[in-house]
Image: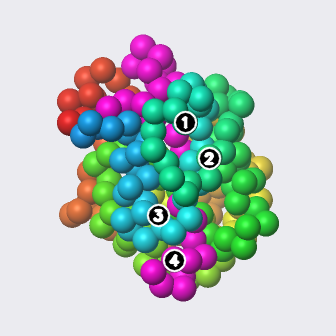
Amino acid sequence: MTDNQGRIAGLLLAAGGGRRLGGRPKALLEHRGRPLVEHAVGVLRAAGCGRVHVVLGAQADTVRDRAELPDCVLVENPHWKQGMGSSLRAGLAALAGTGTRAALVSLVDQPGIGPEAVARVLAAYRGEWSLISAAYDGVRGHPVLFGAAHWAGIAASATGDQGARAYLKAHEEAITLVECGDVAQPYDIDTEADLIHLE
């Protein structure tokens, strides 16, 4: 693990209730015989994130019971029904004061994004003013890396399901895009039809 990676925490947003999946929390969907949240944490670890914070929400107690998440910091978001923005705020708040210089944010429902893409984004880190995003054929996607200097601004603008979208739009010229379309597929598991992507 490089010095840079030691200063970067993985921040996995895994609080969603799976409204379009009949109320099945995405963290608990099965992928390769284990909960999806376990798979997502494994991707962050394999890419080099030594510290991983996982934001839980829907059925948080069940996720804790069923998923093996050793050495992860589990952050509960009681406001998860308000959308991804609330989970991003909760995760960044939990990282404040830990000495972390950047947060690499990934989503639990994107199993097509593996360690190669995450590692590319990590490698582009250049200090706490970094603003880095994976891109797929030039279109911005996840994961995204936020240097600590941006956290307050992101938290202030993260509302509903927008997450950091408004902040990123306002700071578009500062974003470093890292092309990952050759090593990852950025589909989401949102509906019953998307379950074909899970093994």
Q: Earlier in the sequence, mark 3 or mark 2?
A: 2
Q: Nearer the viewer, mark 3 or mark 2?
A: 2
First in sequence: mark 4 or mark 3?
A: 4
In the rendered structure, which disc, 2 or 1, sits on the residue that comes first in sequence? 1
Q: Residue at x 44, y 52 (%)?
A: 41
Q: CA distance from mark 1 to mark 4?
A: 26 Å
Residue 107 part of the magenta-drawn span: no
Going by the picture, which residue comes out furthest to the bottom? 3
Residue 194 visible in the shown view: yes
Task: Give percent across and percent down for residue 100.
Answer: 67, 71
Tell me where residue 46 appears, x and y as whole percent: 36, 65
Mark linked to residue 5: 4
The magenta-colored residue range is 1-30
> Which numbered disc, 2 or 1, marks the residue closer to the eye?
1
Secondary structure of the residue carrying numbered label 4: helix
Q: Is residue 4 above or below residue 143?
A: below
